[in-house]
Each structure stands twice: as C-alpha cells, then as structure tokens.
Amino acid sequence: MNMDVLVSLCKRRGFIFQSSEIYGGTGSCWDYGPLGVELKQNIKRVWWRDFVQARGDMVGLDASILMHATVWTASGHVDNFTDPMVDCRECKRRFRADQIDDMAWTHFCPATKGNKFTIAAGEPCKHCQARRTLCPECGKGELTPPRQFNLMFKTFMGPVEEDASVTYLRPETAQGIFVNFDNVLQAMRRKLPFGIAQVGKAFRNEITPGNFIFRTREFEQMEIEYFVNPLDTVDGRPADEALHDRWIEQCQAWFVRYGVDAARMKLHEHPRDELAHYSKRTVDILYEFPMGWSELMGVANRTDFDLKQHAKFSGKSLTWFDEERKQHIVPYVIEPSAGVDRALLAFLLEAYREEEVRGEKRVVLRFHPELAPVKIAVLPLLKKRGEIVARASELRDRLGRRWASVYDDTAAIGRLYRRQDEVGTPYCLTVDVKTVGDTEKGEVGDGKVTIRERDSMEQVRVPIEALEGVFSRLLDGGTAWPDVAAEFPRGDAEARG
Ligand code: GAP
C-alpha cells in the first residue's frame, strides 16, 4: 500500500492533518482530526482495558511530562540518549550518520558533463563508478564529521532561564513509572510480579522524522513496566526470561486480535552489541510498513538498572521485601513499550481495502468494530420527508448515548454508504418510507429500519425497539454479524449499497 494514498485519505476524511498547515506545516508533527482522535482514543481504551483493567496483576499511572532534571541523569538519557549526526556544509541539512548509507543519493556525474542522477542507496554511479562521499540530498556539500546529538527537548522550569532550571520534556513515559515504584507499592500493597502501565506523550528531537506518523518529534506511548522477582523461576527458567517471552507473545496476539495480519509482523532480536545501555535482551515486534519492515513496538528486559540508578541518585530505597526469602530485592523489569501513533498507522494500513462493487471502486476501512471511530451512521433515505428526518435524528441521539453515532443526509443513499465505508463505520442504519408510513396515502409505518453491514454490505430489516439489543450484541458482545443477521429478514433492495 502506498503511504501517499493513506495520507491523502487521512486528510480528506478528517483523520490526520499536518500540524500548523496554514503556516506551511511542521514536517514532524501531526494533528488528529475528528475521526483520528476517536480512533486513537479507541486504541488506547482497548489497550488499557486488555492490559490493565482485565488483569489482576496490573495497575495504572499518569505521571507528569516534566520531571526533576536528575531523573534524566540517573536514567542515562543525558549521557546516552544520543544519535550520531552529520551536517552538510552546503545545504545545511542534517542526517543521522548511521542512516546515511541507506539513502538514495544525488550525484553530478563528471563522466556525463555533470549530469544530475539519483542513485539507489549503497550503489555506485554506473557512468563514473564513484560512490557517495558528499551530501546525499544536494550532492554538492561536504559532510561534517559525526557528532553526538542528544534527542531530548530541553526547557526551563520556572520564570528564570538559567542552568539550574533546565529540565526536559520526557523522551519516554517509563521513567515516570520507575520514580513512582515505591509510591505505588506502598499504596497498592502489591506482590511481585506486578506491572504499572502508563499512556502518555513523549518527545524526541529526532534528526530524521518522517514516514507520516511513523517517526515524529511528539508522539504517544503505551508502556508497561512489569516488575519481576529475579530469584523466582517460571517453567524452570529465570522468571524475567520466561515472562519476557510471555509478554512478547501477548503483545503480538493483541495486535492480531484488533486486525493486524500475523504474517505482516515478525520479531527482531537486538544483537548483544547493539543493546541499549539498560537492556539484557530486547526484542522488537516489526511490522511490514510501506517503507519496509520497521519497529512497531519493543519488549525489553531492563533488568534492575533503572530502579538501582534512581535509588543511587535519590538516596531512597527502591526494593521489594521478599517475605519467603526474608530479603530486600530490587525487581527486574520487563518493558512492553508501544507507540500509539505507530499502532494507529498499522491498524489503518491493515484496514485499507480497494474493492470493485458493481463496476465501481469502493474504498473501505475494515476496522475492528472496537477501533472504528464511528460505530453507527444513521441515514435518512429521503431528506425531504420530515418524518423520516425526524425519526433518523431521534435514533441517532438515542443510539449516540451508547455508541459513537453520526447522522448524515447530505447525499443520496449510495453515496452516503460509500462515505461511511471509507471511514470504516461498521453499521449504517437507514430510515425509509416504510419505517414511518405515508399519511397522505393512509399507510402506517412498520417501525422497522434497515441495518447494513460494512464488509458484506448485507442488509437486514430490524424493528426499532430491537436496535439497542442488536447493537449491544454486535458492538459490545462480540457476536458475529451472520449470527445476528440470520434472525431478521433481508433488507430493502431500494437502499442497496
Ligand atoms: N521506554 C522504552 C522506549 O521508549 P523505544 O523503542 O525508544 O523504547 C518505544 O520506543 C516505542 O515508542 C517504539 O517502538 C515506537 O512504537 C514508539 N516511538 C519511539 N520513537 C518514536 C517516534 N519518534 N515517533 C513515533 N513513535 C515512536
């Protein structure tokens, strides 16, 4: 799937806009529009429900973004959270030194009177055999030697801009959990293993943001720090190692449950010499994004590194008392860390389909119903008939109290169905003449409406009083459409779409 097609759909249908677009936009920040914010909230809500509320071994936290500056010294971010970068002396563009050989490069070839070519990453020029030495973008400037660049955004806390008031926007939510470890332990009286989850914004001054919402400078994370007794064993293995594997499986299963094809995910084991400074083992779950296999989320074994560092720098004990062994221990930490925006991008890519229906192209987002931004669209078949419009509006208000619902009468029914398909609405509900009757002709309405399902486009005729029951089975109870549809007569061909 082409990312440009998705970017364009996201803008057109109100999912994602470029930040500050009227000022020319910022290349690295995106704004979630009316449908995007619903989709994003649904992802966070099901993640929280499945990994926090549904489990007895998890609790939640919402720590502040601005923290004591020493947190970032203790965590190692001040010294280690850097990328090597090089600058072009000519065009002033900045690149990550470790990514520059993976870029296509611009070349003015001396063997062809200086003609300009764009050459694939890592390849030599086929005319003069030269390899890239200059800036890959402008093809003219020399590059500076690599320098380490810290990715944290610096700011000042308080009214005086001096060294003593320097702090950082958090580059990960994890540290808010570590510094609250003892608070949560005391307040919630937990035994190991247990986890603390947090969802929130993180900020990184990425050198090369890009690929839409894949790499941005402001993004959201859904992180879990799962505290494990390193002296315990699980299935005959050290508990931290066994539970690490279990979390990897659970995270993959979660993405599959909400619509990601398992064949488009794979694991990447970080080689030992590339592990982050805190990690004993890190496994990334990769997804096949349009630009290639890239990290969707990571699951790291952070050992006792963070708790020990914060104990050292704060002078506070961050241990758990093991009653059985009668000793204080510093837990190990398994950290499943997912980006909300990357998860959203993967769910969008998975949902996108182009189909042919009766000779016409239909674009449909086949979202899992729990993720779909709008669950029900209520559509009047004829907007000139006051009773139809009134009944449809009343139904939207009624259903909208339980499920995200919209009312739309701005086009003919076929067009309205296509619009809802394109934003992934699983059910359309149509009010027609038969529903309300025709007083002029002395006909009474049958009090039934048509429900149309997005993927099969099947329609059934359902009594209005049964709607809440039907939608609660479909949207809350997980009952499959064919099971519900089988109980009602087929819908009206008049409203086909
Ligand atoms: N606490 C561990 C940690 O932050 P990470 O691998 O740097 O680990 C975790 O980040 C996840 O956060 C990534 O797998 C990705 O989903 C998301 N993420 C990281 N940097 C991002 C960025 N610049 N833009 C969007 N998402 C990002």
Image: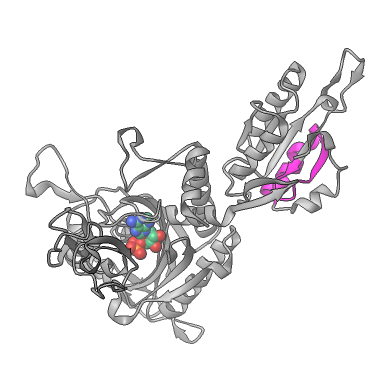
Above or below for 399 versus 86? above
Q: Is residue 313 magenta?
A: no
Question: Which residues make up the magenta segment?
Answer: 452-477
Q: Ligand 1 lies in which image quarter?
A: bottom left
| Residue 217 picture location, percent across and down | 30, 51
Q: Quadrant of the C terminus?
A: top right
The one nearer the camera, 125 or 464, is: 125
Can residue 325 be seen in the rendering of this structure? yes
Above or below for 249 versus 48? below
The one nearer the camera, 211 or 38, is: 211
The one nearer the camera, 257 or 215, is: 215
Most extreme residue toward the right, as rendered? 442
Q: Is residue 474 magenta?
A: yes
Side of 455 relative to 281 (left or right)? right
Can residue 492 be seen in the rendering of this structure? no
| Residue 346 picture location, percent across and down | 50, 57
x 17%, y 59%: residue: 140
Side of 261 relative to 346 (left or right)? right
Quarter where residue 206 is shown:
bottom left
Side of 260 relative to 322 (left or right)? right
x 25%, y 58%: residue: 137
The one nearer the camera, 327 or 363, is: 363
